[in-house]
Image (cartoon, grey):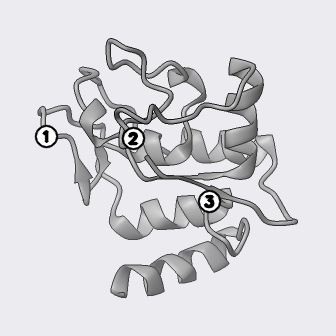
Amino acid sequence: MTIRVGRHPKIASPDVLAELYVAVPEIECQQRCQRYCENIWMAGPEWDRIIDHLGFTPRSDPACPDRCPMLTTAGLCSVRELRPLICRLWGVTETMMCPWGCQPERYLTEIEALALLARSGAFACGPLDPEAALEFAKVAARS
């Protein structure tokens, strides 16, 4: 399991992250998608919040290195209420639709999802303002 944490001197504030989470459409989740929980990108403050909540730094199980270390033995997310933006985007983005038939209020486009991630600071460039994040997302979606 690769967890990439965006670390940049400029970080997204908790208020910005909360604003981004609200922008993600709601979805009735069946909690059956755990096999897709790998290679997660998240902003530094998201990772720090998870560590603070758990009281330790999650580590992958060497016997199952691709499995998210925040999944319980039953395959449920142990930090669901704190889950990072990338996890919130699963199932609600056109390029990450739920294979189990869960459908959001509306699907985000790839550009909308990338712009939210860019604003969060999940990428090495650090958190971007909304206009710069949209431009970044448009370029990233073309590559």
Is 141 in front, or is 44?
A: 44
Amino acid at the residue labelled 2: Pro
Spatial CA distance of label 2 from label 1 is 23 Å
Q: Residue furthest top?
A: 74
Q: On the rendered structure, is 68 left or right of 36?
A: right
Q: On the rendered structure, is 46 left or right of 140?
A: right
Spatial CA distance of label 2 from label 3 is 22 Å
Element assignment for label 3: loop
| Residue located beneath label 1 in the image | 99
Is 75 in front, or is 122?
A: 75
Q: Which mark is residue 65?
A: 2
Q: On the rendered structure, is 48 left or right of 65?
A: right
Is 51 in front, or is 22?
A: 51
* Residue 5 figure quarter: bottom right
Residue depicted at 55% across the width and 83% down the height: 135
- Residue 29 at x, y = what percent? 29, 24
Category of crowding for the residue at label 2, using alpha-carbon neighbours closer than 10 angstroms: few (below 14), some (14–19), many (at least 20): few
Spatial CA distance of label 3 from label 1 is 25 Å
| Residue located beneath label 3 in the image | 122
Residue depicted at 44% across the width and 60% down the height: 113
Q: Quadrant of the C terminus?
A: bottom left
Element assignment for label 1: loop
User: First in sequence: mark 2 or mark 3?
Assistant: 2
Category of crowding for the residue at label 3, using alpha-carbon neighbours closer than 10 angstroms: few (below 14), some (14–19), many (at least 20): many
